[in-house]
Structures are given as C-alpha cells and as structure tokens.
Image: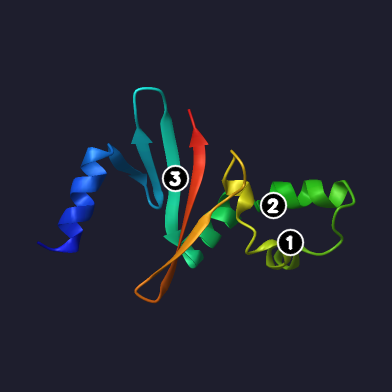
C-alpha cells in the first residue's frame, strides 16, 4: 500500500479536511482546530498576506515602531510566523524528503 493511502486514511479518521490552500481543519466533539501546513515559502506568503499587510506597516510607522519602508519592514519580519498561530505562537518544523514543512495551529473554535 502506498504511503499516500495511509495518510488519506488517517485524515479521514481524524476528520481532517482541507479548507483552502495550506489551511486544514480537524473537528472533534468539542471544537474545530485549524492548522496551517506548508513549506516555509508557502507559510511565508500566508504570513505576508495575513499579518504583514500595508495597514499593519502604516500602524507600525504611526506608532514609531519602524522607520523603514514597507518592503524593508517585511524583510525584517520574515521568518517569524508566530503571529499566524493565534493560540500560543508555536509551530513545528519537519524535514520531509529534504523539504522543510511547517505545521502550526491557527485557531481553535
């Protein structure tokens, strides 16, 4: 049996489903947990889209937290994906066939 079938069976057992690119959810009797799963590059794109918005940069400038341009601000903050995890900021990194894969809890509802 191919490993993909094992993974599919586990996903079905856990009621693990894809919500959108790189966002998955697991439902149990008590709550729903959303997870971001992807390569570092994919997670970085989500981080920039969701967290490092121009509005956030404008706020940072107005609050005196940065005096650099938007592109430089994004470059400074890339790699800290903790804000994507609204629970505790943690994430796990796995090396799968030479590729770094990040898994982080996005939220519990």
Whichever of labels 2 and 3 marks the residue nearer the N terminus, that label is 3
The image quarter in which residue 47 lies? bottom right
In the image, residue 39 sits, relative to residue 91, either above or below, namely below
Q: Residue furthest right?
A: 64
In the displayed structure, does residue 20 sit left or right of residue 42? Answer: left
Which mark lies nearer to you, 3 or 1? Answer: 3
The image position of residue 12, as x and y in percent, is: 21, 41
Residue ranking furthest to the top:
30
Please report the residue visible at 30 percent of the width from the left and 41 percent of the height from the top.
Answer: 16
Left or right of 90, for residue 67: right
Element type at marker 3?
A: strand
Which of marks 1 and 3 precedes in the sequence?
Answer: 3
In the displayed structure, does residue 11 sit left or right of residue 95? left
Q: Specify the label residue 35 is tagged with.
A: 3
| Residue placed furthest toward the left | 1
Tell me the element at label 1: helix
| Mark 1 neighbour density, 10 Å: few (under 14) some (14–19) many (20 or more) | some
Q: Between 40 and 27, which is closer to the camera in this rendering?
A: 27
How many other residues sit within 10 Å of disc 2, few (<14), some (14-19) or many (≥20)? some
Which of the two discs, 2 and 3, sits closer to the camera? 3
Disc 2, SS: helix
Give me the residue at 51% from left, 42% from top. 106
Q: CA distance from mark 1 to mark 2?
A: 7 Å
Query: Where is mark 1, residue-wise?
Result: 70
Determine which of the numbered discs, if any, sits on residue 54 in the image. Answer: 2
Asked if disc 1 and disc 2 are in contact, CB closer than 8 Å, the reply is yes
Image spot of residue 33 (x, y percent): 43, 36
**Residue 86 percent location from the top left of the image:** 59, 40
For the residue pair 91 and 75, the one nearer the viewer reads as 91
Dot 1 or dot 2, earlier in sequence:
2
| Quadrant position of the N terminus in the picture | bottom left
């Amino acid at each position: 049996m191919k490993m993909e079938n094992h993974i599919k069976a586990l996903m079905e057992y856990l009621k693990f489903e894809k919500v959108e690119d790189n966002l998955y959810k697991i439902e149990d009797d008590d709550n729903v947990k959303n997870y971001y799963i992807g390569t570092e590059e994919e997670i970085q794109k989500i981080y920039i889209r969701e967290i490092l918005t121009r509005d956030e940069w404008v706020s940072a400038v107005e609050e005196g937290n940065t005096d650099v341009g938007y592109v430089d601000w994004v470059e400074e903050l890339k790699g800290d994906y903790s804000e994507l995890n609204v629970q505790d900021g943690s994430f796990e990194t796995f090396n799968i066939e030479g590729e770094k894969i990040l898994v982080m809890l996005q939220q519990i509802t």
